[in-house]
Amino acid sequence: MNPWTSYSRARAGARDVHLRGVDIVIVVSCGLAALALVGPARWAPGSTRSAVHFAIFALGPLVLRTLASYFPRSRPLTFVASFWLLPVLSLSHGLLNPVVSAVTPVLRDAQLAAMDQRLFGAQVSVVLGQVVPPWLTEILMICYYGHFVWPLLLGSVLYFTGRRDAFDEYLLALSLFFSFNYLFYALVPAIGPRYFLFHSFSEPLRGLWVTPFLDSVMRTPPFARDCFPSGHTGTTLVVFVYSYRFAPRVFRVMLLPGLGLIAATLVGRFHYATDLLCAVPLVTVVVGLAVGWSRATARREAIARPVTMDAIVRP
């Protein structure tokens, strides 16, 4: 029995509780965040509230998988356990302020803007603001909000079509990406060109109808130091990889909106071009780790699978 993916309760007749890769990532990353917030980062404003939430997130997989082992035929319980990553990602972003304040209390926008200037000879978001027409800005801003749609759509397709191995690997890659992404937010906090380069733009972001509203919504999040690397770009690339491998129809449907989403991170003035570039190697690493974990798990399960007498071939 692999101690990293399952544990047994001592009572007679108890079932094994199997943790998936995504469960382990959630338990470890959220557990470490909670410990840091009650330890060295406890001085940061809001640390107690965030610590409580991260502790709940960390306990979630242990509790849900345990309950699922007692009630294996409960589909709602299995569903909640499988999609526990969803509430974790939805809520944890707004809880990062005390973590970031404790790790790196100063902004790194000046360094990121300087990197853009060195690599491209200009501020990419400023240049695009001068050449992209309002109608295209409108389309790209709508695409930008696909960030909340495509990851859930792919996960639902893989889950409800019975591709559980692909589903587990996809969620593992997604959880690893966000864990590293949030770590980099703490190490390199930045508020982005829309704030730092405000005076470089000749006018507010212009669209046709809904662009001002969509832009204003993204100006009121509880946590705004989330530029490096681009989470929108990285998440979209992860979904690209796994939809191409396991759900080609989803890949074809989301290809153009997904590319528009990535372009919108610059046109909407949310990110520096450096943020997008640095998301690519991060995605490569987390996909590689997820594939390696998935293959290693498959080999262990094949070795542990009992061999029946009928499978013995005699000469």
Image: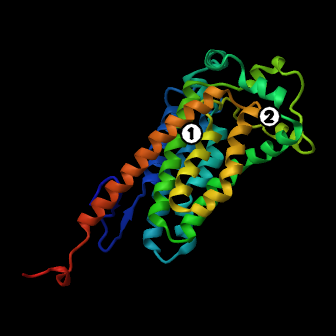
Answer whether residue 281 is visible to the viewer in this image: yes
Nearer to us in this view, 277 or 82: 277
Q: Residue 38 at x, y = what percent?
A: 52, 33
Question: In the image, what residue occupies the spot 87% across and 41% down?
Answer: 211
- Quadrant of the rendering where the C terminus is positioned: bottom left
Q: Residue 78 at x, y = what percent?
A: 52, 68
Answer whether residue 44 is visible to the viewer in this image: no
Residue 222: quadrant of the picture: top right
Task: Estimate the spatial distance between the alpha carbons at disc 1 and disc 2, rounded to whole Å.
Answer: 25 Å
Can you tell which of label 1 and label 2 is closer to the viewer? Answer: 2
Nearer to us in this view, 94 or 116: 116
Residue 230: quadrant of the picture: top right
Q: What amino acid does circle 2 point to? A: Arg
Q: What amino acid does circle 1 point to? A: Ala
162 versus 226 height, above or below? below
Q: Which mark is residue 51?
A: 1
> Position of 223 compared to 168: left or right?
right
> Position of 1 compared to 25: left or right?
left
Nearer to us in this view, 268 or 175: 268
Q: Which mark is residue 68?
A: none
Residue 107: quadrant of the picture: top right
- Quadrant of the rendering where the N terminus is positioned: bottom left
Residue designated by label 2: 219
Q: Residue 293 at x, y = what percent?
A: 37, 51
Question: In the image, what residue occupies the spot 75% across and 47% down?
Answer: 143
